[in-house]
Amino acid sequence: MFQNAELEIFIMILLLLIIISMVPVIELKYQSDIYENIEMFNKYCLNNDISLISELEVKNSYMWNISSYIYDINNLSNFFYKKDSSDMNDYKKLNRNLSIILNDNDIINNIMKIYNYYLNMSIGLFIILIIFACSQIYIFFKINDYDYLEYCLESSYKDIGLESSFRYYLYILFTYILIFIILFSIILKKITELYADTDAYEYIMLMKELDILLKENKPTSLPITNILRKYSKYKIDDISYATVNNSAVINELLSVYNKNNYKLYANNNNYKITLKNIDKIEYYNSDEAKEKVKSKIDTIFMFIYVYILLLIVPLYMLSISLQGNYIYLLIIIMMMLIFSISVYNTYNTLHM
């Protein structure tokens, strides 16, 4: 089966790491489509009756599901300002360029979950490519030493062509690695645009504020929490089970908010909660706001086709090395896919 075990093992590892690097992009698109379909089926089951659709709970909306997926929802509280802050906003702006940030002298993960996810799943690929590139440069210098030794022993240069051929091979290799680096950088940039150029961050932080008020139920927040409970089907203490897209709910919430504009709502951790963006709550669930998110995700997913093209080179090399033993190649690919899915499921289980 194996004609060049070292090369074939390397190619199989490379294929596996490329597939692993693709997982966050594929999953992002998959989740977006799932949430869109959930919303579509809800409308279908309710016969597109606007009055019934507006009664749906927050957890059934596309914006809640996709925002909860792309942000580290358990880490949102770290981004609130404290009550004594002079900043006009309730929460800090996103740092688009870092996966780990300094927050009040503590080092924490950024809440851009997909950004971190893609970085973590791609780091192995870049490490193996860099190690392989360095090893090939080392071999290239060894080849030069060999040519020089031949020249010294024979007193006339014997052109074996090895150095020249290897040089062209290195050009191709570094072009291949450069394409990966460019692809990786573009995808990361597009992922940051998903966070910076949509309304998902404002939406999920507003929902987090309402969630804190519901859970703690302080006297100062009763005018708000009573409205949320009044229009919800069940006794709730979690914003995901509330109904907030009903026009009656929105009107009452805005009425209370306008009377107490920039009021600081009491909470156990002294977060600065003023519900500043509650006047945009209806917009956050509009088709326009949702389309911003969907279009960014679709743009990110387009680059999966570049990944597929880059898979052709190692697959071709592996097929040549295996000398037509395609059944083994098929088994290897299936095993790598199974392993990748297992890693993906394990990762998700550990991070739930």
Image: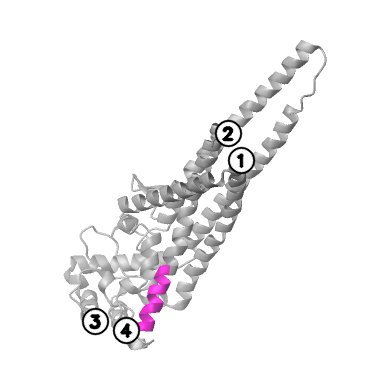
Q: Are the residues flagged by discs 1 and 2 in contact, CB closer than 8 Å?
A: yes
Q: Secondary structure at mark 4?
A: helix
Residue type at the position of mark 1 = Gln
Question: Foreground mark, 3 or 1?
Answer: 1
Instruction: List x then y, in percent, for residue 88.
Output: 38, 64
The first of marks 3 and 1 along the sequence is 3
The first of marks 1 and 4 along the sequence is 4
Q: Residues within 10 Å of mark 2 (few under 14, many from 20)?
A: few
The first of marks 2 and 3 along the sequence is 2
Chief secondary structure of the magenta portion: helix
Residue 323, image quadrant: top right
The label on residue 323 is: 1
Relative placement, left or right, of 143 versus 271 is right
Q: Secondary structure at mark 1?
A: loop
Q: Secondary structure at mark 2?
A: loop
| Bounds of the magenta segment | 34-45
In percent of the image, x 35 and y 70: which residue is there?
276
The label on residue 3 is: 2
* Numbered circles on residues, count: 4
